[in-house]
Image: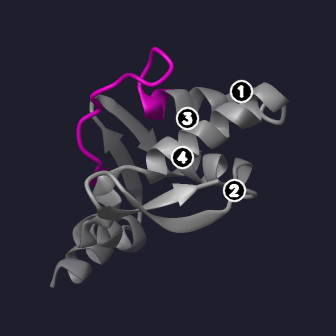
Amino acid sequence: MMGDIYRSAHRVVVWLGTENVPFRRRGLLDTIRCATLDPNTNSNDNQLALRECMQQLARNTYWTRAWVLQEFVLGAQIELKLGCGSLQEDIFRQFWSCTNCVRIEPANDLAGEDATRMR
């Protein structure tokens, strides 16, 4: 039933929880947006920032919740929300393509819950 709702929705907001610790003096999603849209995206410093962002995003325990994955995969147009920050799907796709060389592997993280860690 929920899968049908997510598929038929015009836009799905994927809530990833609150952001307790600001990332690099601003929110994680704001950092991702700025680093992705930076004209020097391929610079070494920016690539390190993007990888660090990917690691932080992947460690979010909300990814272990089935409905979050359904929202992310089945939504026609998604918007990620983390605390006060938000990230539109098109910028997330650019971010993902900038970090496509990052290897993903399962790991136990945060109180024994399964999460994803990137290297």
Mark 3 neighbour class, 10 Å CA radius: few under 14, some 14 to 19, many 20 or more: many
Assign a secondary structure to mark 3: helix
* Residue type marked 3: Ile
Identity of the residue drawn at 55% across and 33% down? 33
Q: What element does badge 1 sit on?
A: loop
Q: Determine whether, in the image, residue 77 is placed left or right of residue 81.
A: right
Identified by mark 1, the residue type is: Asp
Residue 14 image position (x, y, % from top left): 30, 54
Mark 2, Cα crowd under 10 Å, few <14 / some 14-19 / many 20+, is some
What amino acid does circle 4 point to? Gln
Whichever of callouts 3 and 4 sits on the residue coming sooner in the sequence is 3
Question: Is 69 situated left or right of 111 in this image?
Answer: right
Residue annotated with mark 3: 32
What residue is rendered at 28% in x and 56% in y? 62
Check if residue 65 falls in the magenta segment: no
Comparing labels 1 and 2, the label whose residue is closer to the camera:
2
What is the three-letter code of the residue carrying label 2?
Answer: Val
Q: Is the magenta stretch mostly helix, strand or loop?
A: loop
In primary-sequence order, the first of circles 1 and 4 is: 1
Q: Which of marks 4 and 2 is nearer the N terminus?
A: 4
Q: Earlier in the sequence, mark 1 or mark 3?
A: 3
From the image, tell me which residue sits under label 1: 38
Residue 112 at x, y percent in the picture? 29, 61
Q: Which one is in front in this view, the residue at disc 1 or the one at disc 4?
A: 4
Camera-near label (2 vs 3) is 2
What span is colored magenta in the figure?
13-30
Q: Is mark 2 on a helix, strand or loop?
A: loop
- The answer to whether 13 appears left or right of 74 in the picture is left
